[in-house]
């Protein structure tokens, strides 16, 4: 049940609903993310963006509907979700690093336990990914010795160590001081330039404008409108999108 279909879009979502008790947070979401595409989810707090992202790798259990990852239906109870998750890198608002482990050990632990890599191989890959995010010199530090921006870059490197086919970002800069946001966004830009498939929940409209292939505006658990970033952010069609963008003053 977990054999991938390399011709299928990396992410396919069909009629997705999610309830928390009586509250319907997602109300019939339909959209795909194509290979190599960067899709930014924007919208007000409570619009369902993060819930949608968490349903994509089943950190939240969908109430109804279908989510397919590379053609595999992860809502099927027969699917080995843990196996599918190895193809999906996830970066959260909080960095979720193990505080008692060095950066190197943080980057090795899932490689060893989930992928079964030998220590030498896991170390080599950790070194490569740290270099990719510009933090080679921090390999033996503990997270408490790093800035928030550095910790988030380590979190990105940790996800990349698993050799994912796609990356999910849940407001990766929201916990950072303003002067540290740029260093994380720069790493994400480089990933996009390298062709990584990315689904990003963000309030960074300049990033969305410059990097996204498509912007999806959500409100009230539905997709209100979507399209190229210049269209959605500069010339939105829907009044609700216009009101949202006026409130945050997109430059």
Image: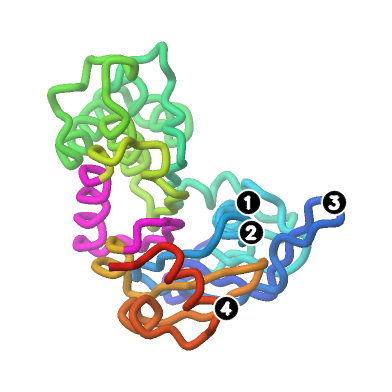
Q: CA distance from mark 1 to mark 4?
A: 23 Å
- SS of the residue under disc 3: loop
Q: Position of residue 248 (x, y in %)?
A: 41, 62
Please say if the residues under marks 1 and 2 sit with CB atoms less than 8 Å apart.
yes
Q: Which residue is mark 4?
A: 224
- Contact flag, marks 1 and 4 (Cβ < 8 Å): no
Question: Which residue occupies 36% across, 63% down?
Answer: 197
Name the residue that disc number 2 marks: 74
Residue 99: quadrant of the picture = top left
Label drawn at residue 58: 1
Q: Which residue is mark 3?
A: 21
- C-alpha span from label 3 to label 1: 18 Å
Which of the marked residues, 3 or 2, is nearer the chain's N terminus? 3
**Magenta part of the protein: which range?**
182-205
- Between tags 3 and 1, which lies in front? 3
Mark 4 or mark 3: which comes first in sequence? 3
C-alpha span from label 4 to label 3: 24 Å
In percent of width and height, residue 137 lies at 13, 23
Q: Is residue 62 toward the left or the right of residue 165 in the image?
A: right
Q: Secondary structure at mark 4?
A: strand
């Amino acid at each position: 049940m977990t054999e991938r279909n390399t011709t299928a879009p990396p992410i396919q979502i069909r009629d997705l609903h999610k309830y928390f008790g009586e509250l319907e947070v997602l109300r019939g979401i339909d959209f795909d993310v194509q290979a190599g595409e960067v899709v930014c989810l924007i919208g007000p707090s409570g619009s369902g963006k993060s819930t949608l992202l968490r349903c994509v790798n089943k950190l939240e259990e969908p109430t109804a509907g279908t989510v397919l990852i590379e053609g595999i239906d992860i809502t099927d109870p027969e699917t080995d979700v843990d196996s599918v998750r190895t193809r999906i890198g996830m970066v959260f608002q909080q960095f979720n690093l193990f505080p008692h482990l060095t950066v190197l050990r943080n980057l090795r632990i899932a490689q060893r336990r989930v992928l079964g890599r030998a220590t030498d191989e896991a170390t080599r890959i950790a070194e490569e990914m740290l270099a990719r995010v510009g933090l080679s010199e921090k390999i033996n530090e503990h997270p408490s010795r790093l800035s928030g921006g550095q910790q988030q870059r380590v979190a990105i490197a940790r996800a990349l160590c698993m050799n994912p086919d796609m990356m999910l970002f849940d407001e990766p800069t929201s916990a950072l001081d303003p002067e540290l946001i740029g260093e994380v966004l720069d790493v994400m830009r480089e990933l996009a330039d390298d062709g990584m498939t990315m689904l990003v929940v963000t309030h960074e409209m300049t990033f969305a404008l410059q990097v996204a292939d498509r912007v999806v505006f959500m409100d009230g658990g539905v997709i209100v409108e979507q399209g190229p970033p210049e269209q959605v952010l500069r010339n939105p069609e829907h009044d609700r999108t216009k009101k949202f963008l006026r409130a945050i003053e997109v430059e």
